[in-house]
Amino acid sequence: MRPARLPTARTYSGAASAAGPLLFVRSTRRAQLGEWVQIELEGQPERRGQVIDVGTEVTVIQVFEDTLGLRPAGAKITLTGETATTTVGKDLLGRALSGTGAPLDGLPSSIGETRRPIWGAPINPVRRQRPSDFIETGVSAIDGMNTLVRGQKLPVFSAPGLPGIELAADIVENARPSRGEPFAVVFAAIGITERETQTFVSRFRESEVMQRTVLYLNQASDPTIERLLTPRVALTTAEHLAFTHGFHVLVVMADITHYAEALREIAAAREEIPGRRGYPGYMYTDLASLFERAGVLESGEGSVTQLPIVTLPDGDMTHPIPDLTGYITEGQIVLSRELHQRGVYPPVDVLPSLSRLMNAGIGGSNTVPEHREWADQLYAVYARGREAKLMAAIVGTEGLAPGDQHALDFTDSFEQRLIHQGRQRRALTDTIEIGWSLLETLPRDELIRMSEATLQARSERDRNGEDAK
């Protein structure tokens, strides 16, 4: 990622002090937030940095490289007059890049169409168009039960040991637009291991999806500050594809927890007063500056949809990271350790999961007319079956009412047939059909969430299908 040239560079001899990855420089002039810095010390390789705080007396610089052996008083510090920008353009599709845009695929750096600052702004609410178009992810638990809508931000809440990143990779490969419009995926991996990096690159290269995907891969060994830059670089590229070229862009960011931990690390080095569990008090605002860059513009043809992956520390839903993420976004997809241990993939627990914009993207020509009633009925029976499973552990299966016994049998079938699909993509039509086949195992008088007209229409379709055969 090459900085864009702004006004003149200024050089200073020595810093006042250092704390971890931070340098504190006094009496700087015209320093800019986000300005790039060069740090030289005799006998040592040149280091890079970025201005992260500008005060009347002290400017704070985040050093990218290791600061071991860096003597603040002997350092030559140059504020370059340049701020962070990234190359954007359609020729980035099919490329694998580092978290700051450097090539990882052995190809030359992209020339692109232009360079844009990475510090984008949220979309003005007045210019937003209400999300209303369905995005097919190929995952039944999402498409059928917690539908993703174009322009939405829908996080996946995982936990240590659960396949949150694997699910993200599946969605990158399987996602489809609703009506065949120009579609692209921007995948931003934040703080992943070298093994995970190689897995993603090789997996996507072997599939046809790579030609419509841009990969930004920030590794755990990269400087902390780069974890804060990676999602912003990815979103800048997504915005250019969406609002300049009319693409509908799905941005997958994994893992937001690594991003938040980098934010806490830098805040601690700056000796800021910590908030909940040591995270900075401005973390809500900072996360919102990422998530609110999703949406659909009224005047444009493109859109940006976000699917962030959040690993819950200790599996705690009340932890500040998922808690604040839930406030900003429009729902959540929750992964279950119990389902994972039973071999269900993807292990999505549909009961605590929620898509607040689902109703805007289903029904009519988007999916199927009965989608809302279909999902409500599946939810109702599955929730009753989960309760019946707890009751059966106390009174035994024989002690359950007939309706509870039906719901208990339904629960296992629902998890094994509709939720569990392995690594294979499943079309929405197949998802709907599996759901109907499950509901048809129940007595008709227990389908209380479905209207008579819907049930009658289903019966007529079944008869017409049999006649066609």
Image (spheres, rainbow, N blue to C red):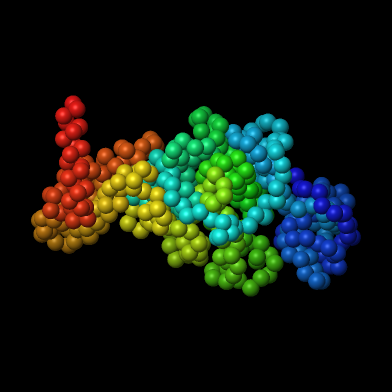
Could one spot residue 261 in this view of the protein?
A: no
- Residue at the location (18% across, 26% down)? 469
- Residue at the location (62% across, 60% down)? 263
- Outermost residue to the front: 299
x and y, in percent, of residue 310 in the image: 49, 54
Q: Is residue 462 left or right of residue 173?
A: left
- Outermost residue to the bottom: 273
Q: Nearer the viewer, residue 136 or 132?
A: 132
Q: Nearer the viewer, residue 190 or 68?
A: 190
Could one spot residue 463 in this view of the protein?
A: yes
Q: Nearer the viewer, residue 255 or 370?
A: 370
Q: Is residue 204 left or right of residue 16?
A: left
x and y, in percent, of residue 41 in the image: 86, 53
Q: Is residue 90 above or below residue 2?
A: above
x and y, in percent, of residue 196 in the image: 54, 41
- Residue at the location (57% across, 47% down)? 300
x and y, in percent, of residue 258 in the image: 56, 54
- Residue at the location (68% across, 31% down)? 107
Q: Is residue 308 above or below residue 395?
A: above
Q: Is residue 102 left or right of residue 275?
A: right
Count of numbered circles in the view? 0
Q: Is residue 446 left or right of residue 148?
A: left
